Amino acid sequence: MLMEQVLLALTPLMIGTALLGVTLGIIWGALPGLSTTMAMALLIGLSTGMSQSVAIMFMLGVYTGSVFGGAISAVLINIPGTPDAVPTMMEGYPLAQRGEGGLALGTAIAASFMGNWVGIVLLISFIPLLLTLALEFRSWEMFLLAMWGIAISGTMASGEKPLKGWISGWIGLLIAFVGLDSIHGVSRFTFGSFTLDDGISYIPLLIGLFGLAEVLRVLPQDSPTGIPTQVGRVVPPMRTLFKYSRAAVRSGLIGTIVGAIPGAGANVASFFSYDIGRRRASKEEQKKWGKGSYEGIVCAEVANNANIGGSMLPTLTLGIPGNAAAAAILAALELKNVVVGPTIQTENPGLIFFIYIGLIIANFLMYGMAIVLIKPCVKLFSLPQTLILPMIIPVCVIGAFAVRLSYFDVYLMLSAGVAGYVLHRFGFPVAPMVLAVLLGPLADENLRRALVIFEDKEWWSVFTSPIGDILILVVLYTFYDGIFRRRG
Amino acid sequence: MEEALIMLTKTKLLIAASVAAMAVTPSVAQAEWPERPITAVVMYSAGGGTDTVLRALSAEMAKQMDWQIDVVNKPGAVGGVATKFVLNKSSDGYTWLGAANYNKFARVKGGAESKSWEDWYYMQAGTSLASWSVRPESPFKKFEDVIAEARKRPGEVTISTSGSGGLWHELAAIVAQAAGVELKYVPYKGGKPATLAGLNGEVDIAGGGVHEHIEFVRAGKLRNLQQTGPEDIKLEDGTVMPSVGNFLPQIKNDLPFSGIYNIGIRRDAPIEVIQAVQNAFVAAVNSDSFKEVVKKRKLFIDIKLGEEADRRAAFLEAVTANTFQKLNVPGAKTPEELGLPDPAEFDKWWPPKGYKPLPLAGS
Amino acid sequence: MTQNESSEPPEEKAHFTGEEGGGERTTPRKDLGAAVVIGILAITAMAFSLRLEVPTSIYTAPGLLPFLTGLSLLAMAIGLGVGAIRDGGSKDYFAAARAGAQNYLSQQEARRTLLLIAVLVFYIFLAGQISFNLRLPTPFFVFQFSSWEAISMPILAAILWFFWRAPIWKCGLFSILMIFFLAGIFRYAFHILLPAVG
C-alpha cells in the first residue's frame, strides 16, 4: 500500500503539480499582503475542479512554498510576506542592508528545508505521543499559551524598553476584544455596528501595519534606502545550519508541537521559537539579535516550516485542523467526499501515506525552486524602491479585501497603515501588536471558557493541570525577566 | 439589457456607463438564462458543514445545467453579513444565498431586516441531526444518566456547543427543556473544536451534529447518548445511535430537530428565473452524486419547496425567537419585536398578512 | 536645542537597522505625549467595558478582560509618562511640542508622507463608493473591467509619476500592467469578486 502511494505520487503529473504549487506558493508568499492563509482559503474553491490527488498535491505545494516565500520580501524590503516571517524580517533586513541579503535568504532556505524535515519526521514517527500532548491543551492551557505569547511582546521591542513593547501589545489586545464575545455573544466595543460584530481580522491589520506603513515611511524619503544591489552568494549555507544545529532542532520541536495544537498556527510557532532562541543563544550571539542574527533566522524559519508537519497531525488523525491552512486542505478533501476523521485509515487507506509523500516531495521542490527563484526575486526587489513600493499599494488593497470580501477591511488596512506610521514615529514597535491581535482572541475566549468550566469547582482545581502549572511559571518568568532584567 | 451587462450595486454614486453598443443579444433574456456566471454566497466559512454541502449541491447544479456557479464565502453575524450582501445586489437572480436553517438566526440575532418568507425564497435540500456524545470512559452510559445527574446538580453538567446562540446550542437547549433539566452550555468556535472538547474531556458531553460525531462513534472514541432523529441510527458494526424520542416520548412527534441546508434567492427576482433555479435545484438534489455526499455524512435529503418551505422558515424562526428568549441570549430580538407567534399558536397565525406564495410549478 | 531633540535629521534614518523602535529616535517629550494618549485610550476602554452587560457571574463577564487590560495599560502609560518626566520630558512641553510639529511639517519628506496618505484616503474612499463591472464578450472569453481597475490605474500611475519620476507613459504602462495582472489573478483564477463590486 505504501509503495502504491509512492508510485502514484511520483508520476510526472504529480511532480509537475507539486512544482507548480510550490512555485506559485513562493511567489504568493513573497508578495506583501498575500498570506498563506488566504492562498489556502482561495484554493478550496479552485480544488473542486481538480482530481483528488492533484488537489492535495497542489495544496501541499502551495502551503510549503508560501510559508517559505514570506521570508523573501521580509529580508529584501522589510515587509513580511506572511505573518510568520516577522521574526525573519527583524533579523534578515538588517543583514540585507549590510549586503548579506543573499546569505540571509540562503540561511532561510536551508532552515526551511530542515524545518520541513523535522515536521515530517515527527509527524510520521510520533503521532500517538504528539497527539496525546496536543489533546492535553484544553481551554486553560490554551489561555496560558496565548498569555505567554502576549508576555513575549515586551521582549520583542528590540532596542526599546520592554514597556513600549508591552504597551503596543496591550493596544493590540484591546483591538482583539472588538466584536462579539465568543462565550455569551455580547457585542464589545462595536458601537452598534454589525460589521464590527465579527471582530477585527488580523490580516488587514497586518497588511496595514507592515505593508502600507513601510510604504508610507520609506517612499517619501529623499533617497529611499533600498537594499544594496550586491546581495552576495545565495547558496544555502549548510554549514551555518550545523553551527546552529541545537537551535534548529529546538525550533523544529517547538514548531511541530505548536502546529499540532489546534488553534495555534505558524505565526505563533515562529514568534515562540524566536523568543526562546534569543534566551538560549550565547552571550555573543545575543548582542547581534535584532541587528542581524543568522541564528534568529534559523529559529524562525525552522519553526514555521516544522509547523506544517505538526499542523497535519490532528488534521489527519482526528479531522480537526491544526491551523487555518490545514483546515483548507481538510475542506478540499471534504469537497472530494473524503471524510477525514479517526477512521481515515480504514475508510481511505493510503491517503495518509500519500500526504506524507506529498509533503516530502513539496519540501524537495521548495528547496530547489527557492534557489532558482531567489536570484530573480533579488533582482526584482533591487529595482528602485520608488517603483516597487507604489506597486505594493494595490496588492495591499486587494489582499485586505479578499479574505472576507469586505471593503470594511480595506478601510481597516488603511487605518492600520497610518497608525503603524505614527507608532513608528513615536518609537513603538508594531510586531508586539500583531502578536497580541493574533493571540488576544485565543487568550480571551479560552480564559472565559475555562472560567465557565471552573466556576463550580474549588479554586485550587485551576492548578491540577501539570502543563498549565508549567505554563504559569513560564509566563511569570517572562514578565519578571522583562521587567527586572533589561536586555540591550 | 444594460442591467445584465453592468452590475450597479451601490446607489450612492452610480456610474451608468453606456454599453448599449455591446447589447446585440435579444432582450428576451429568460430563454437563455443565465447569460453570465452565477455567484452563490455561502453564509458560513469555507470548509464547514454548510459550505461543503452547498458547494457539492451547486457543483451538481452547474454540471447538470451547464451553468457557471462561483461559490464565495461571506461568514459573519450568524448569516447577517451574507444576507445584506445579497440584498445589496441586483435582484436578477444571479446572486444566491447559500444558507442554513432558512437563515433564521439572521433576523433574530444578526441584524438583518428581511423576512425569510416575504423577501426571500428558500429551497430546502436536506437536513442534519443533533447529537450528544461522551467519551467511552464517561460515567454517563445512557441519556437517562445525564438527566439524573443534571437533576442532582442543575446547571453544572457541561455540554459543548459550536457557538453561543448557534444551531447546536438551540437544539441542545430544546432537548434539555423537554427533559426538564438545566445544562451548562460551553461555546466553542465551530463544530470541530466543540467535538474536540468532548474528546479531551473538557466538557462532560460533546454537543454537535450526528455528522460531526459519527466518525468518532465508529472509531470507538465517542459514545452516542442521543440524536434528534425520529428513529435510531444503526451503524454497520451494530452500534446504535438512539433517537431522543425513546427517552422523551412527549417530543417524539415533533422530531426530527434538525439543521437544514438551503439555497435562497431574492423573492423579487423574475419568476421565470426562480423557476429555472428551482428546476435545477430539484434535479441536483435528486442526483446520485449528491445523494452519495449526503449519505456519507449521515445527512438526509428532504426537499421542501414553495409554500411549505416558506411556512417552515417562519415556523423555525418563531421557535428560535422563543427559545432564545427563554435562554436569555444577549442581543436576540424577542418574538414580539419580530411579530412572531408562540410555536404552539403557529398554525393559527399562518399565513401572515401580506404573505403571497410564489406561482411556481412543481412545488 | 529643543528643536534638535524633537526632530530626526534625515541622515539618522538612513542608518535604520532592525525592526521598528530600534531605528527611530524618540525623545522624552514624545514619550510623554504618547503616554497621555495611551492613558486616555486605557480609561476609555475601561469605561466602555464597565458598561457591558454581565449575563451571569462577574468571573465570566464579557467586560472583565477588557477592563483588566485597560487597567494594566493605564499603569503602563503612567510608567511611561513618569519615566519621560524624569528624563525632562515636561520641560516647556507645549512650546517644544509645537516646535517639534512645525519642524516635522517643514521637512519635505513629512509633507510628502502626508500627501501620500491623502491620496491613499481619496483612492480607497473612491474605490469604495463607485461600483460597476463591465462585461465585454470577446470570441474567446468574457473580458471584464471593473470600477476598481478604472480607479486604481490612474491613481497608481500618479503615485508612480510623483515618486518614481519616470516619463508619464512609463508610469501609465507599469500601472496598467500591474492592475490587470492583479485583477486577473483574483478574477479569472480564483473567481472572486473584486473590491467595490459589493
Image (cartoon, rainbow, N blue to C red):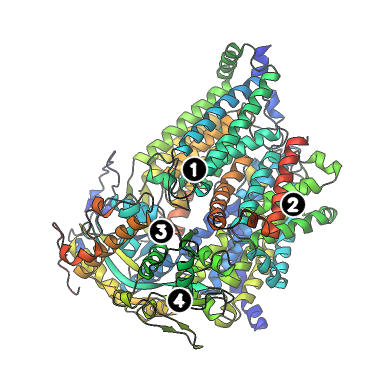
Residue sitting at x 41%, y 47%: C195
Same chain letter for marks 3 and 1: no
Mark nearer the N terminus (4 vs 3):
3
For mark 3, name the chain. Answer: B
**What is the three-letter code of the residue carrying label 4?**
Glu
**What is the three-letter code of the residue carrying label 1?**
Gly
The residue tagged 2 is A299
| Position of B216 relative to A288 (above/below) | below
Q: Is residue B117 visible?
A: yes
Horizontal relation, residue A71 to residue C137: left or right: right
Q: Secondary structure at mark 4?
A: helix
User: Considering depth in this image, is B359 or B196 the residue closer to the camera?
Assistant: B196
Q: Position of residue A88 (x, y in %)?
A: 69, 47
User: Considering depth in this image, is B128 or B225 the residue closer to the camera?
Assistant: B225
**Mark 2 or 3: the one toward you:** 2
| Position of C186 relative to A220 (above/below) | below
Work out which quarter of the rendered image holds the N terminus of chain A and state it. Answer: bottom right
Horizontal relation, residue B33 to residue A336: left or right: left
Q: Position of residue B28 (x, y in %)?
A: 17, 61
Classify 10 Å Cα crowding around label 4: few (below 14), some (14-19), many (20 and above).
some
User: Considering depth in this image, is C189 or C19 the residue closer to the camera?
Assistant: C19
The residue tagged 3 is B72
Q: Secondary structure at mark 2?
A: helix
Q: Give the CA separation, mark 4 to mark 1.
A: 37 Å
**Mark 2 or 1: the one toward you:** 1
Classify 10 Å Cα crowding around label 1: few (below 14), some (14-19), many (20 and above).
many
